[in-house]
Image (cartoon, rainbow, N blue to C red):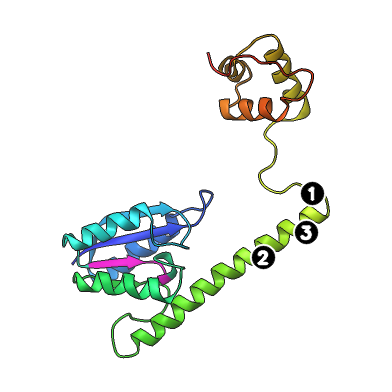
Amino acid sequence: MNAVAYLRVSSQAQDLAMQRAAAERASAARGDTITKFYSEKRSGKTIARPELDRLRADARAGAFRRIYVFRLDRLSRSGIRDTFELIEELRSHGVEVVSISDGFSLDGPAAEVILAVMAWAAKMERLAINERISAVRERMKEEGEAWGRPRRLDDDAVRRIMAMRKSGKTIRAISIALKVPRSTVADAVSENAGTKSAVAAPLVA
């Protein structure tokens, strides 16, 4: 059967290779050929996602009859309603949804109940993750620790940037000279704009 696969992870640091390999194995076991992979690195808190939108459009056009997902929560983690509506939309276009790792079929009399439970569990897991992140952020704030990405520039690099700015160098020229992204240089200049070494020089060449 003509089939596709939808792959999703939540962050740029995560890899889609494991999901792709699982989809290839599962489809081969059924005698299917995956003709297209829809892949994206976006949160599942909303179903408004570019690759998912393309998949839905292709389903409406009758481009495939079966879709493989590693788990149901790869399609949606925004709750029972969104998950039900998405599955029913695909079904209405003659598309069968195959969940590889959830261990249940989305067909049959018990499928609706299982689907509702899995969709609810996926949303609860997402909310729990958000709560843990918030708790860590608050703890680090109380302890005076920085939250977010580590600084890309040390104090010496910042001093060099500001000295070059004082001499009239543009952001672009500093970026090239120090081999630092322009956005990073611009951020450093902006953050230190109130220091004595900051001057009103043009930002770009």
Q: Can residue 96 be seen in this view?
A: no
Tell me where residue 58 sits by quadrant: bottom left
Which residue occupies the foreground of this view, 65 or 75? 75
Amino acid type at mark 2: Arg
The answer to whether 124 is drawn above or below residue 167 in the figure is below
Name the residue that disc number 2 marks: 132
Q: Which of marks 2 and 1 is nearer the N terminus?
A: 2
Who comes first in sequence, dot 3 or dot 2? 2
Using the image, tell me which numbered label, if any, was put on residue 145. Answer: 1
Relative to 87, residue 108 above or below: below
Name the residue at the left extreme: 62
Pick the residue in front: 158 or 108. 158
Q: Give the range drawn in magenta.
A: 66-72
What residue lies at 78% left-to-right and 59% top-to-bottom?
139
- The residue at the point 71 percent across, 63 percent down is 135
In whole angstroms, how far apart are the C-alphas of marks 1 and 3? Answer: 9 Å
Q: Which labelled disc corresponds to residue 139?
A: 3
Around disc 3, counting alpha carbons within 10 Å, would you say few (fewer than 14), some (14 to 19), or many (20 or more)? few
Question: Do the residues bearing badges 2 and 1 touch, measured as CB atoms within 8 Å?
Answer: no
Query: Tag 2, which secondary structure?
Result: helix
Looking at the image, residue 148 sits to the left or right of residue 25; the answer is right
- Density class for disc 1 (Cα within 10 Å; few <14, some 14-19, many ≥20) is few
Tell me the distance, in whole angstroms, between the alpha carbons under discs 2 and 1.
17 Å
Q: What residue type is labelled 3?
A: Arg
